[in-house]
Amino acid sequence: MRRVEESRLKSHSEGHIVLLAPMTGLVVPLANVPDPVFSGGMFGDGIGIDPLEGKLVAPCDGVVMHLARTGHAVTITTAEGAEILLHIGIDTVELNGRGFAPMIEQGAAVRTGDVLIEFDQDVVARNAPSLVSVIAIANSDAFGIVERADSGTLKAGQSPLLTLRAKDGAAVAASREASSVSEEARQSIVLEHAGGLHARPAARAREAARGLDARVEVRFDGKKAAIESVVGLLGLGAGQGATVEIVGIGAQAQAAVDAVVRELTREAHGEAEEKPARQMSPAPVTAVRPQGADSLAPNTLAGVCAAPGIAVGKLVRWDDADIDPPETTGNTPAAESRQLDKALAAVDAELNTTVRDASQRGAHGEAGIFAVHRVLLEDPTLIDAARDLISLGKSAGFAWRETIRAQIGVLSKVDDALLAERAADLRDIEKRVLRALGYSNAAARSLPDEAVLSAGEFTPSDLSSLDRKRVTALVMARGGATSHAAIIARQAGIPALVAMGDALHAIADGTQVVVDATAGRLEYAPSALDVERARSERERLAGVREANRRTSQQAAATRDGRAIEVAANIATLDDATTAVDNGADAVGLLRTELLFIHRQAAPTVDDHRQSYQSIVEALQGRTAIIRTLDVGADKEVDYLTLPPEPNPALGLRGIRLAQVRPDLLEDQLRGLLAVQPVGKVRILLPMVTDAGELVRLRKRIDELSAESGRTDKIEVGVMIEVPSAALLADQLSKHADFLSIGTNDLTQYTLAMDRCQPDLAAQADGLHPAVLRLVSAAVQGAEKHGKWVGVCGALAGDPLAVPLLVGLGVTELSVDPVSVPGIKARVRNLDYQLCRQRAQDALALESAQAVRALSREIWPQD
Ligand code: PEP
Ligand code: MG
């Protein structure tokens, strides 16, 4: 701090401006502020403070140029023209004023140390990603920071924080000008995002412009929408490839336009809400229309399987569109307006809990969906329109419903399937708010014991509030691979069909139906015999599952004695418990990136150690193969803002990330090596391409191991998920203790088919003979050095693949925890010698379909 004190003494004589700390707290360098918008300097150069008290004071004399409506941020202009942005916490605009009490008004003159905003630290800490606050020089082009506090605890209004100096006289004059004159900035851009200006980039763009003193709108095709209104932006209908113009007016117009442009041109891969197939689920469900759909029996409809299974039940039209609030009540508009506020707040709180629960369960796709709903809920276009109707004497419920319907009408005219799909999100918040206002659809609530729910398309909240014990299946006229309902149905294990067409609506409520989701069929008004067959098939499958469970704790071997370890792929502590309950012999793959996905900062050595330690303990003596961070491509984590790459799947992912962030891997390895007991952990390295990479990493692991005082060597395995690794397996096996084949990526890279592309899901089949030949090459390479080979990709859990993988010499299959009992049972029914012969035959076939047909014929499924 001495450097700063000295400069403060000199400040007047040299035209320096000294800013004192506006908060009591700890210094956080700007680069470490857990928000890329700030740490990347988008709001200007500055510094962070982790506050210890809930008070923000003026760091200098000046005028309050801008006070955020939500009370979480303020900008002060000094007499010299420097514009100081003070922003409390991260993403706190989302709190919508909750927890903040501004003590001044916009335009007020303030003196150093005056209290600007008081805030409730607990409320902010509980509801925002971080309390770390930012002091940024908004006009950094005109003022540079010459000194900054570099560490330690600061006292509000006392400790020097930053010293600024005008860059040159002209710049200051220009800056003053800019503050008082309304500037205009414009930029046209082409939307490269898949899906165009969809909900998430719209929400991000809104947020980027929020702290800046400028009005921003987006123009497209003769229409325009304010950046604050996500529904307005969606309503523009600007799809992928559209050219939109961003227009800003105000003192910070250019910065605001730049911020919005940056968000809208950012690479948009990995967006769960629009592209469910890009979630981290290792086994994307293959959405294929059943073969022979054209030759269906007369009382049968075809659909696309969204979640497999078979069910019998009574069709129930689940259509909350029928919630019909009265147009007026006897209340005054003020009372109705308050009702609406209360309902919106209740729904917001409910959604907040849902987002948090979903994140904790690791259901990140689901969390993303509901996070977008929260943004829609505070959309000024919707709220203002509803208030207008209320002021005309309408009830809160009626006003809300009409407003949403009008907006859905706008979206349905948009010529873009993905944007039009967002109408489902609006319908969802319509229903939630109507329910919070006390309205319901009683008919839909009372379900028969076996209900097959039918709708045009289910909204996510329909499914989160379902009585899942009574619902045997879900069927939808619309929907598809990008439908949120499909993702949630899969996660809940309810058989579901989508895209059945409007013929579905012609089936009367209460009609008995048989849904064979696996086969993509719904049979209505079935004969007693068909119902009987379906029921007994369902029961038989349940019986098989139960029998498998009973033997699941025993090791599995083929009939002729070949032992096969059936392990589990896990991502969380809960998964570890499920794995043990289901009889997993070990953990064959712990995907560590999922443990740390929603953090604001990279995990520390101790975070790593603790997470793995608790998982190892939950495994009660079983071994865990822990894979080092495999981020990049389809796996994104919040704390890494990786530069956009033209081909992320071919870029800095897996161990390649260590080329740019070696610290991440080192910290993880240190944490891993500290887990006890030492023999229960093995390390698995993702995306290895050749022996050179492995030798380097192995050497570093051995050094870190020695540093940590370990005397024994930890086992290190290599993922075989790149064709080069499979072809060079003999070289890799010289240095590795085992190989684990990642068939998800191996298939993607062998067939050049993006594993996240729903249209290719049916073709990107790991049973393709080319992939099987690489599996065979990997096993042969490993055998030369006496090393074992496992498979941890989704193929290991595919009953038709199991005999072939066993036949090719794989001795470990690592599958979803719930699949362990079934796969063990499958192994026990095999004859290893037969598997060996027939696996060689499969290598000579010409397509994945041919391989599947062969397997089905020799080893029919239970
Ligand atoms: C794989 O690629 O098969 C694999 C198991 O890894 P992930 O699915 O996590 O990429
Ligand atoms: Mg992989």
Image: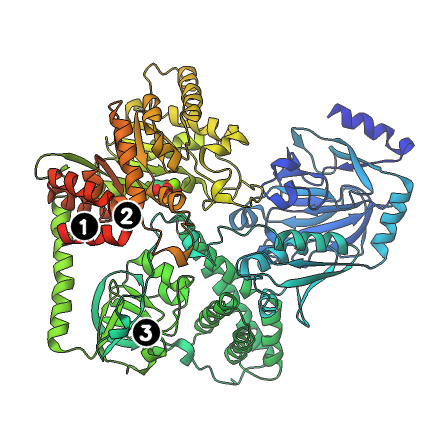
Q: Tell me if mark 1 has few (under 14), some (14-19) or many (20+) residues whose alpha carbon lies within 10 angstroms of its own.
A: many
Q: Quadrant of the N terminus?
A: top right
Q: Tell me if mark 2 has few (under 14), some (14-19) or many (20+) residues whose alpha carbon lies within 10 angstroms of its own.
A: many
Label located before the other in sequence (1 or 3): 3
At label 1, which amino acid type do we have?
Ser
Kindly identify which residue carries mark 1. 855
At label 2, which amino acid type do we have?
Leu
Can you give x and y, in whole percent of width and height, for residue 645 in the image? Answer: 56, 44
Coloration of the structure image: rainbow
> In the image, 862: left or right of 660?
left
Ligand 1 positioned in quadrant: top left
Residue visible at 28% across and 83% down? Answer: 508
Cβ–Cβ below 8 Å for labels 2 and 1?
Answer: yes
Tell me the CA gap for discs 2 and 1.
10 Å
Can you give x and y, in whole percent of width and height, for residue 173 in the image? Answer: 90, 47
Q: Which of marks 2 and 3 is in front?
A: 2
At label 3, which amino acid type do we have?
Ser
Can you give x and y, in whole percent of width and height, for residue 852 in the image? Answer: 23, 52
Tell me the CA gap for discs 2 and 3.
35 Å
Q: Which mark is residue 767?
A: 2
Can you give x and y, in whole percent of width and height, for residue 54 in the image? Answer: 63, 44
**Residue in the foreground of this view, choosing between 88 and 488:** 488
Kindly identify which residue carries mark 3. 454
| Count of marks overlaid on the render | 3
Label located before the other in sequence (2 or 3): 3
> In the image, 117: left or right of 738?
right
> In the image, 723: left or right of 42?
left
> In the image, 256: left or right of 590?
right
Q: Does residue 860 appear in the picture of this structure?
A: no
Q: Does residue 196 appear in the picture of this structure?
A: yes
